[in-house]
Amino acid sequence: MAEVKSDEISAILRKQLSGFETEVDVYDVGTVLYVGDGVARVYGLSKCEAGELIEFPNGVFGIALNLEEDNVGCILFGESSLVKEGDMVKRTGKIASMPVGEAMLGRVINPLGQPLDGKGEIHTEKFLPLERKALGVIQRQPVKEPLQTGIKAIDAMIPIGRGQRELIIGDRQTGKTAVAIDTIINQKGKDVFCIYVAIGQKGSTVAQVIRSLTENGAMDYSTVISATASDPAPMQYIAAFAGATLGEYFRDTGRHALVIYDDLSKQAASYREVSLLLRRPPGREAYPGDVFYLHSRLLERASKLSEDLGGGSLTALPIIETQAGDVAAYIPTNVISITDGQIYLEPNLFNAGIRPAINVGISVSRVGGNAQIKAMKKIAGTLRLELAQFRELEAFAKFGSDLDKTTMQQLRRGEKLVEVLKQKQYEPMKVENQVLIIFAATKGFLDEIPTSDVSRYQNDFLQEVENLHPDIIQSISETKDLTQENTDKLMNVLKDFTERFKSTIKQ
Amino acid sequence: MTSKASRRYSQALYGLAEEKGMLDRVSGDITNCLNMIKSSRALALFFHSPAIPKSKKLIAAEEIFKGKISDLTLNFIKLLIQRGRAELTNGIFEDFISLKKEKDGILDVKITTSIDLSSDEKSAMKKKIDEYTKKNGILDFEKDKNIIGGFVARIGDTILDGSIKRQLELLREKFKQGEMLN
């Protein structure tokens, strides 16, 4: 590299200086009265707006949350120890916002949009406010396209549509994050931009998530927004809003985005912390009165835009962690009532080896059904019904020995269905394949197969269809439907395959 | 130190004085009293101490102020003592004075410069500030070499910063962003 000559630098600097106009700089100031625990009270700042970005000394920024008679309550996004009592603070005149753009893809950032992955500066052109009003009724349209999670149990029975808000709820260690990560991985090549917001998690967990996303090639279309447990509470609280803002950027430019808030219970806890420090009155479980509004305004930003506005969508998958299965606690009930359905994950299912541990009996999706592809709709109805019957009988059958033939048959069918719905992590399945295997199961072709061989059956069968009858798969993916002709064809293929498969089973 | 309560009291006193047409008299009283309390430590302690019973405070207030200040002001001081708010006296008086200034359209402006200004320059400065604020500014001049050159004017919470120091800071920011290279 040629050495830079000093006169070259001076030439550039001179050029810069010539464009520099001296003007009187006008700004409003206040004085710090109290600082600590991530909040500060500031005297003065008389013209300050709610939600405005405030500049503290040493490069610390804050947001004005409480505007009171003689002081302003701010939350700080940096070390409280860098701010002292009596420090002069400045209004910036800007509402708290973050940079957005395509450059964010593949990056790990903090809620302020600054990179955390050491891959250098992120060059974006646009800034959007963190807190934006959700769209009105006119700008929206009903959810109509599916968002395939690649998880059989979800896509078949709890379908999620683009623009929907579906809650993932369950105790710790039940695979909530796994469901979310699989969903991200499955968006590969589907033009859905994914944003994973980690709120109040362990740094190691976040690192793990980033690694699995990278390994599965999902980082190319994803952004991870991280506010770990060691970040200040204000940072954790706004992380969710940062995720929504970034998602809205993709939505408003006519594309599809998926945001995962992992998890909102911790976000509520950090909001509670901030609120209590700002001396807002506590309510139930010491959460402030507007904790419902906190989540409703966040999740309301998920939407499907009308065609006039480009038809983009923002799907939200909030995650809530329950304590010992208590879904009647404050935050879980709030978020359940806000979202368009919920996916329950249960520890006893998880421990029984049913993974993903989705309790399909109480999991629902309120709008996704409209978004399901026709082929899936046709077969999912039977699946749901048969599983429901199975669950009813299962408890009953534990007592009795003498069961009639139909009951035995129903039990056997249920067992196979449960087995078919099991799925390994990081192995999302294409919806066409899901249709094929669920078709086989609901038509009873698996009834004679031992449970331990079901997964082998599934693999071999899908392999065979792919190799010998690709037209069926193609037809499903093109028409999104299972035509009568194909149904008949598939029945024949299945009959033939099952016979051959049975002979391979070791006695 | 001002508080919410002191603002209420000062507003009440201001309203009543205005109604009775005694605003100038009362505000003179208040300024005098405030100076008295500030100059005499004994008096300040006497007012602020909760150990001294209200009855004694009342008698003392009567003796000290009777005849020197208007009845309205004296009654106000007595009311404060009676209500156990004597420790707020200073704050209330300060609030009252700033309230009076605000109503009179007077603005306290603090001007910082790096050199001493001549009286011509000072009056020119006052004219400019008055033009900007559309109020009657009372300028308080201060010298601070740290700002290098130019001036800094503080009007309430707003700062007009035309100092060389600030210009250099802004220039540094611009260099950092490298925005002039484009």
Image: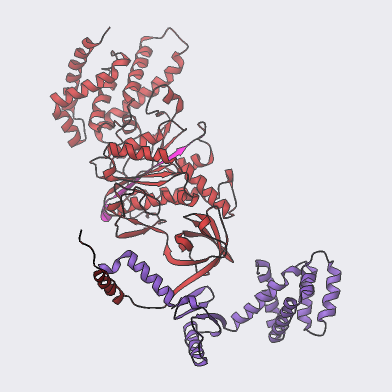
Quarter containing the C terminus of chain A: top left
Counting from the top left corner in percent of width and height, residue A41 is at 56, 61
Q: Position of residue B115 (x, y in %)?
A: 49, 84
- Say above or below: B67 vs A97: below
| In front of the other: B66 or A167 | B66
Q: Quadrant of the N terminus of chain A?
A: bottom left
The purple-tinted chain is B
- Residue B15 percent location from the top left of the image: 68, 78
Image spot of residue A464 (x, y percent)? 17, 22
Q: Is residue B113 above or below residue A66?
A: below
Q: Is residue A228 left or right of residue A108?
A: right
On the rendered structure, is A186 left or right of A85?
A: left
**Residue A359 in view (yes/no):** yes
Q: Looking at the image, which residue sits at the far bottom?
A: B120
Residue A190 covered by magenta stretch:
no
Report the number of numbered marks. Answer: 0
The answer to whether one can see residue A369 in this image is: no
Using residue A200 as the reference point, say whether residue B25 is left or right of it: right
Q: Is residue A314 magenta?
A: yes
> Which is more toward the observer, A57 or A39?
A57
Q: Residue at x 42, y 26 (%)?
A: A350
A356 sits to left or right of A439: right
Which residue corresponds to the image point at 19% horizontal and 35% vertical from the top-left? Answer: A477
- Indicate the chain coloured red by its letter: A
Over which residues does the magenta segment extend? A306-323
- Give the quadrant of residue A487: top left
The figure's colour scheme reads by chain
